[in-house]
Amino acid sequence: MVERRSPKPQVGGSNPSYPAIEGLSQRFVIMEKFISYVKNANAELGKVIFPTKEQVRNAFFSVFIVVTVITLFLALVDLIMSLILKSIL
């Protein structure tokens, strides 16, 4: 069996294992990445083309009509199936 030793036997094991200066620079790197992300997200949001009121209204009526037609179709199928089951039972 191999004996495990600390890299610095006189210290007995340091926590964290990296120096504090590297920890601070790591935080700055994370903050720079976050700032870059926010800037890129803002730039992409500027490229978005939002629909006009007329486009929204047309889409609403289209969806409303399709949903109404499907609802009527399913209600008719349900009625027919229930009449068939009543006649059988």
Image: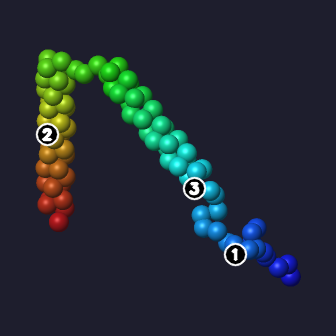
Could you tell me the amino acid type at mark 3?
Ala
- At 13% from the left and 49% from the top, the residue drawn is 79
Circle 3 residue:
20
Q: CA distance from mark 3 to mark 1?
A: 18 Å
Q: Residue 37 location, x and y as percent?
A: 43, 34
Dot 2: element: helix
Among the 4 quarters of the image, the one containing residue 74? top left
Could you tell me the amino acid type at mark 2?
Leu
Circle 1 residue:
12
Q: Nearer the viewer, residue 69 or 3?
A: 3
Q: Is residue 52 left or right of residue 44?
A: left
Q: Nearer the viewer, residue 32 or 46?
A: 32
- At 60% from the left and 67% from the top, the residue drawn is 15
Contact, CB < 8 Å: mark 2 with mark 3?
Answer: no
Q: Residue 72 location, x and y as percent?
A: 13, 39
Q: Is residue 29 above or below residue 41?
A: below
Circle 2 residue:
72
Q: Residue 26 location, x and y as percent?
A: 55, 47
Q: Is residue 8 left or right of residue 30?
A: right
Q: Looking at this view, name the residue that lies furthest to the bottom.
A: 1
Could you tell me the amino acid type at mark 1?
Gly
- At 15% from the left and 55% from the top, the residue drawn is 82
